Image (spheres, rainbow, N blue to C red):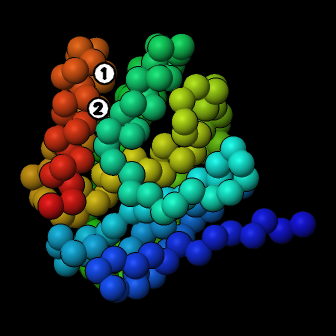
């Protein structure tokens, strides 16, 4: 039996927004990208999750604070593995290049975005046991947020600053403050 997926269209200020692309991460998570308005090739990211009552959540906008809290939850049980996962994210940050054309934005696809070996995903699979998000979702979300940030600002640094703070073990309030600031700057 096929899973019936919810639509990812949403209305804001009387305008219907239709995704450029929607990706089904697993049977309970969908993530979509839309044309954004902050730069010529900006992307807006939204997602839905299946709730415990088997209904789908409202369409949500992921923020840096969401994945940061999830990483902190994972770190409580799997400190060393989470540190390796942060190194993995820092490597992705260093390799991420901004979108430079409409064609690049239109051609984003799950296979390219998750161009990671199954072995690499399996290495971090245990982290899915803690927190709210699966590893596959976190990787895709991080890649999209990094792509969004670097596309909108050539001198982007907030995502990297949050990663570095988590990696260094900065105090909780400093990390959350940086993640909250990043979320506020991302959608101005």
Q: Position of residue 9 (x, y in %)?
A: 49, 77
Left or right? Give the position of 180 relative to 47. left
Q: Among all residues in the image, which is located at the extreme left?
A: 155
Q: Among all residues in the image, which is located at the extreme right?
A: 1
Q: Can residue 37 be seen in this snapshot?
A: yes
Residue found 39% across the figure and 30% down from its top: 69
> Which residue is under mark 1?
167
For the residues marked 1 and 2, what is the alpha-carbon distance in whole angstroms? 6 Å
Residue found 69% across the figure and 44% down from its top: 52
Q: Position of residue 183 (x, y in %)?
A: 24, 47
What SS does tag 2 mark?
helix
Q: Position of residue 79 (x, y in %)?
A: 46, 13
Q: Is residue 129 above or below residue 98?
A: above
> Which residue is under mark 2?
163
Residue found 40% across the figure and 79% down from its top: 11
Tell me whether circle 1 and circle 2 mark residues in contact (CB < 8 Å). Answer: yes
Residue found 32% across the figure and 69% down from its top: 43
What SS does tag 1 mark?
helix
Left or right? Give the position of 88 relative to 99. right
Q: Is residue 104 above or below residue 93?
A: below
Left or right? Give the position of 157 relative to 102. left
- The front one of 112 and 173 is 173
Q: Among all residues in the image, which is located at the extreme bottom?
A: 15
Q: Can residue 123 be seen in this snapshot?
A: no
Q: Is residue 37 above or below residue 151?
A: below
């Amino acid at each position: 039996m096929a899973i019936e997926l919810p639509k990812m269209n949403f209305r804001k200020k009387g305008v219907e927004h239709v995704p450029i692309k929607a990706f089904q991460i697993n049977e309970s998570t969908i993530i979509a990208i839309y044309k954004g308005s902050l730069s010529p090739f900006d992307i807006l990211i939204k997602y839905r999750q299946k709730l415990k009552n088997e209904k789908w959540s409202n369409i949500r906008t992921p923020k840096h604070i969401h994945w940061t809290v999830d990483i902190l939850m994972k770190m409580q049980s799997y400190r060393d593995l989470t540190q390796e996962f942060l190194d993995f994210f820092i490597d992705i940050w260093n390799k991420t290049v901004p979108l430079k054309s409409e064609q690049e934005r239109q051609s984003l696809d799950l296979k390219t975005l998750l161009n990671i070996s199954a072995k690499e995903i399996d290495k971090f699979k245990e982290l899915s046991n803690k927190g709210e998000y699966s590893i596959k979702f976190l990787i895709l979300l991080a890649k999209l947020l990094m792509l969004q940030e670097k596309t909108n600002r050539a001198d982007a640094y907030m995502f990297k600053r949050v990663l570095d703070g988590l990696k260094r073990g900065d105090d909780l309030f400093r990390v959350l403050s940086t993640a909250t600031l990043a979320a506020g700057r991302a959608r101005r």
